[in-house]
Amino acid sequence: MKTRTLFIVMALFLAGTALFAGAKKESGGPAFIKVGTEGAMPPYNYVTEQGEADGYDIAVIKAIIALLPEYRVEFVPTAWDGIFVALEGGDFDLIASFLGWRKEREEKYYLSTVSYLWTGQSLIFKEGRTDLRTLKDLEGKKVACGVGSAYTTRLEEYIKETGANIEIVYNDGNIANTLTEIDTGRVDATISSPATTQLAANTLGYKIGTASLTEEGWTAVPIHLLFPKTEKGKALRDQFDTVLKQLHSNGTLREISRKYLFGKDYTTKEALLAGA
């Protein structure tokens, strides 16, 4: 991802010097948790015109902290190419930045054992179409794809494996141009992340429909919080896991998802695939 400007959003209290679970703490006061986030990936995380961190990731952390009164939170928007180094260097206590599960991440860091979001690939098409729900429905259709993207590579593999008659219309990956091609009928569909594509469609004034892909190879991916692989990092992870379970069970995560992700519940794999 492109390097973005580092911007720090301060909380109401200044940190002291004592440490607990990797957080600074004033004598007799709450510990200060610093949360790294890219701050440039709406609707998941971004910085508002008022200079405040916002987005789904941010709202989830605030909901967690609301149930952990021993803590206060400070968000530290950080360029993507330096965010992991900053965590390892102790600049913050965890990362909340739309991080999908990867084996190499689990080996190097502590991931929350409870995911707080799921993401996957969806067919994107013009609103009102009822003929596009699965990869098989793309037979004889034109699909806009960015050159070299992961989605494009997987679709190319699918065509090769199945012999499907799907015409790929290659472009530069600009989602605005892709949505224009869909709206004008030059292509039938594209494959993309539903929430980020919906944000672009809303901005451009286009009406789109989406359908989650459930075929083999188009796997839904859980999104996790990430903590340093230290004793303090594990202790904080365990606390956050406990609260995340509560937020799942009482419906809070679902409400946050629908608020930030265009009325959709993406907090479980089942909800993602159902398009709830």
Image: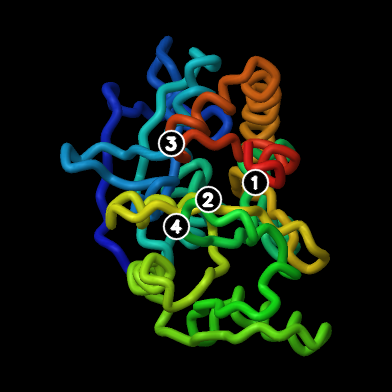
The residues bearing labels 3 and 4 have C-alpha atoms spaced at a distance of: 13 Å
Identify the disc placed on residue 197: 4
Badge 1, how many Cα within 10 Å: few under 14, some, many 20+? many
Q: Which residue is mark 1?
A: 118
265 w.r.t. 83: above or below: above
User: The residue tagged with tag 3: helix, strand or loop?
Assistant: helix
Q: Which residue is mark 2?
A: 98
Q: Given the current orientation, which residue lies at the most extreme top position?
A: 28
Instruction: Quarter of the image for the N terminus: give it.
Output: bottom left
Return the disc, 1 or 4, that comes first in the chain's sequence.
1
Asked which quadrant contains residue 26, the reply is top left
Q: Amino acid at mark 3?
A: Tyr
Q: Is residue 51 left or right of residue 152?
A: left
Return the disc, 3 or 1, that comes first in the chain's sequence.
1
Badge 3, how many Cα within 10 Å: few under 14, some, many 20+? some
Residue 20 rendering spot, x and y as whole percentages: 54, 28
Residue 92 rendering spot, x and y as whole percentages: 45, 44
Instruction: Residue at 48%, 16% (x, y): give it.
Output: 66
The residues bearing labels 1 and 4 have C-alpha atoms spaced at a distance of: 15 Å
274 w.r.t. 173: above or below: above
Residue 2 visible in the current orientation: no
Number of callouts:
4
User: The residue tagged with tag 1: helix, strand or loop?
Assistant: strand
- Please name which of the two marks, 3 or 4, marks the residue nearer to the observer: 4
Circles 3 and 4: CB distance less than 8 Å?
Answer: no
